[in-house]
Image: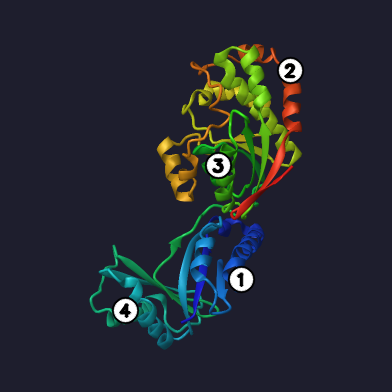
Amino acid sequence: MKEILLLKYGEIVLKGANKRYFEDMLLRQLRRKAKPFGDFEIYRSQSTIYIEPKSDFCDMDGMMAAAGKVFGIVAICRAAVCEKNMESILATVKEYIPPHLAGKKTFKVESKRSDKTFPLDSIEISREAGGAVLSACPHMRVDVHNPDVTVRVEVRDFAAYVHPGPVKGAGGMPVGSNGRGLLLLSGGIDSPVAGYMMAKRGMTMEAIHFESFPYTSEMARDKVLRLAQIVSEYNNDEMIVHVVSLTKVQEELVKHCDEDYFTLLLRRYMMAIADRVASKFYCGALVTGESLGQVASQTTEAIGVTDPVATHPVFRPCIGLDKEDIVVTARKIGTFETSIEPYEDCCTVFTPRHPRTRPDLQKVLAQEAKLPFEELVEEALAGMYRVDVTPEGYEVRQ
């Protein structure tokens, strides 16, 4: 029996004259995702994207999983295709639906007749299809209010489609539809989630990672790049990571500045460096994983001290989330287990015993004046190198 994937999108249908721009972007991304899984024809009609296998050797399971990571799709239906007549529809219902009802007790049928030339209306189609389900599965009973399974019949332009309901898609907007952002990617739980959340809103993500070799190890850097690999699956299967050493900055801070200002001053250096990298590579915003009040550098006052060094807007998609909310998302996207691997990052070395939580900007600037700020920033940028990341691996480019 021939199967097809029907992909439904959400916000895109509201884009009016710009709708085609977003649809074309989705089609390009889906065609790229489809390549490892066989030869598929991918096209659109009636606010739905069709993914049709062109041979029996196509991996439908793999294609469905890949489509579930494309932002802009809110629902995915794996459906059986049949001719647009009731005899064919009922035969397909009897053959295709019973395996999906295993272990279930109740069902209902919903029908959609997009082709208004079809002789039966939606209610009549549902009634006939419901009878076919009961004929094939006499143990089932109808429950129109709270069914275990909702069987769907769709009569569309090209054919009729029968399926046991949609699987939830990734939602959001197509990656690339809302500019580029530079993610400050650490080895923690929060920043990969922040990158995922901004990609979901259509922003193409690049990343910057700060290391402190030899105080941080190559294993710590590898951990971060493995996190980037996971996030890249939601970012058109690619991510550029710019790696910058903060060793010299941190050593100078330890020598010349008061301990309780280390974290704040380091954050200002990180924001300043990231801001310049964003300008160089045409990123319109910085993205961080900060959550309000989670640590000393993420209080309202501390954020107010670190933001002024940036000329780009700073997006903090996790700012109002509890840690548990962030962990739930990290588990969902597959970054959590990697994030909790016990390697140091630059933010956990030289940590002050009693960091300032309500700093005064003028006092921070007085501490910062003890060091040649611009010279240290430029020196850090001069040593920056790039890593090209895909879901399959990464390549360091000096």
Asked if the residue under mark 1 is in contact with the one under mark 4, i.e. CB atoms within 8 Å, the reply is no
Label 1 crowding class (10 Å Cα cut-off): few <14, some 14-19, many 20+? some
Q: Secondary structure at mark 2?
A: loop
Label 3 – label 2 distance at C-alpha: 32 Å
Please tell me whether mark 3 or mark 2 is closer to you in this view.
3
Q: Where is 15 relative to 149, above or below?
A: above
Q: Gap in Å between the C-alphas at discs 4 and 3? A: 51 Å
Residue type at tag 4:
Val
Quadrant placement of the C terminus: top right
Q: Quadrant of residue 259?
A: top right
User: Is residue 311 in sight in this rendering?
Assistant: no
Q: Nearer the viewer, residue 381 or 1?
A: 381
Q: Which residue is mark 4?
A: 133
The answer to which quarter of the image holds residue 33 is: bottom right
Pointers 2 and 1 in contact (C-beta within 8 Å): no
| Among numbered discs 4 and 1, the one appearing first in the sequence | 1
Residue 43: which disc?
A: 1
Q: Position of residue 187 (x, y in %)?
A: 54, 37
Q: Counting residues from the N terminus, which is met first, the one under dot 4 or under dot 3?
A: 4
Residue underneath mark 3 = 223
SS state under label 1: strand
What's the CA distance linking mark 4 and mark 1? Answer: 31 Å
